[in-house]
Amino acid sequence: GLDPLGTLASGALLIAVAPTDEARVVAALAEAGISAGTVAVLTNDPDEAVLVTRSGEQPLPRFDADEVTRLF
């Protein structure tokens, strides 16, 4: 019953880059054999984060603690 988005701190690396640098960073990671893609877009309003999914955009959920801690 854990939400995978709440487990991101458990071994995932998130990189924030300017939209103009996104393609170059993703390409460089691909050359190194690292799969990467856009998972969120941040606006000028730090309280307005959007999650980009195959079905569209939705508000980015917030977690007060890593979901894995719910197991313990």
Image: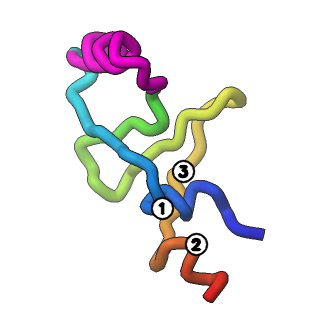
Residue 29 placement (x, y as % from top left): 34, 20
User: Is residue 48 positioned above or below 68 on the image?
Assistant: above
Q: Which residue is mark 3?
A: 59
The magenta span reads: 21-36
Asked if residue 42 lies left or right of residue 9, the reply is left
Q: CA distance from mark 3 to mark 2?
A: 18 Å
Q: What residue is drawn where x is 61% and y is 89%?
A: 72
| Callout 1 amino acid | Ser
Q: Which residue is mark 1?
A: 10
Residue 51 placement (x, y as % from top left): 52, 42
Q: CA distance from mark 2 to mark 1?
A: 9 Å
| N-term-proximal mark, 2 vs 1 | 1
Name the mark nearer the viewer: 2 or 1. Answer: 1
Badge number at residue 43? none
Q: CA distance from mark 3 to mark 1?
A: 21 Å
| Callout 3 amino acid | Pro
The N terminus lies in quadrant: bottom right
Residue 35 placement (x, y as % from top left): 48, 24
User: Is residue 8 positioned above or below 32 on the image?
Assistant: below
Mark 2 closeness class: few <14, some 14–19, many ≥20 residues within 10 Å? some
Badge number at residue 67? 2
| N-term-proximal mark, 3 vs 2 | 3
Q: Which residue reaches farthest right?
A: 1
